[in-house]
Amino acid sequence: MIGRLNHVAIAVKDLAAATAVYRDTLGAEVTDPLPQPEHGVTVVFITLPNTKIELLEPMGEGSPIAKFLEKAPDGGIHHVCYEVDDILAARDRLKAQGARVLGDGTPKIGAHGKPVLFLHPKDFCGTLVELEQA
Amino acid sequence: MIGRLNHVAIAVKDLAAATAVYRDTLGAEVTDPLPQPEHGVTVVFITLPNTKIELLEPMGEGSPIAKFLEKAPDGGIHHVCYEVDDILAARDRLKAQGARVLGDGTPKIGAHGKPVLFLHPKDFCGTLVELEQA
């Protein structure tokens, strides 16, 4: 069912500093910061040959990554995102197997303009998993 | 400098259960467990079209992932591994920029039979980073 690893998301408190680590220290290609107020984050994409890393900085009140950063002030890997061909079929398959889909199970439009869902970390090896329609 | 994302490593207490999550619930291709006593882990590889996920279960006394799992009993993402063309040049570049390389800075032979180094999470957005010679 799952296809490509679309991205690994790393939450950070200081996006400029994190971008410098990836651009200058690790020598990777980085984008300009992209504010996504509807998702409560500002994002920098790190382009690797086979996938991407997304650096996320909290934006505004109640950012979905604010709590995570309280517990992990240095930052850390927040989630992984796998692509699926059909997100509704994926959701139904997961629910039929007893896995917990977060929210009300209705896909939302994610940061790349495609439908996404998040899965409960307790059901997926302690890892927050995002599914994105390919 | 960094190239492909070679893998994302997820530490788990119960490799059979984690493998079932990826094989049965997420419908991914998984390998048989591969004991790696020299690294203190047993590994299952999840083959995705563009990269791989490695599920790691502690093996023996003093496994390098035992402490991590004490703090994260459900499991969690342990490290990411980026490929580099020349691991010694990468190490020297990182050290020149003040980044901390773990151990004595001498690459060890990693789980794929290639030279690897680990970088200090505090210098890399709270993320343990492995570099592997491509």
Image (spheres, coloured by chain):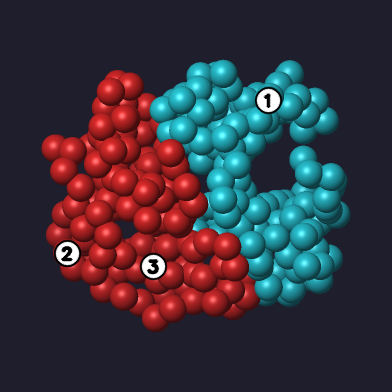
Chain colours: A red, B cyan
Against B49, is A54 above or below?
Answer: below
Amino acid type assigned to the residue bearing label 1 in the image:
Asp
The quarter of the rendered structure image containing the C terminus of chain A is: bottom left
> Does residue B82 appear left or right of residue A32 in this picture?
right
Based on the displayed image, in which of its 4 quarters is residue A88 positioned?
A: top left
Q: How many marks?
A: 3
Nearer the observer, disc 2 or disc 3? Answer: 2
Q: Are marks 1 and 3 in contact (CB under 8 Å)?
A: no
Q: Is residue A109 left or right of residue A15?
A: left
Residue indicated by mark 2: A38
Q: Amino acid at mark 2?
A: Glu
- Marks 1 and 2 sit apart, C-alpha to C-alpha, by 42 Å
> Residue placed at 70% from the left, 60% from the top?
B83
Residue designated by label 3: A14
Q: Which amino acid, mark 3?
A: Asp
Residue A60 can be seen, yes or no: no
Which of B86/B18 is in front? B18
Mark 3: give few (<14), some (14-19) or many (20+) Cα within 10 Å.
Answer: some
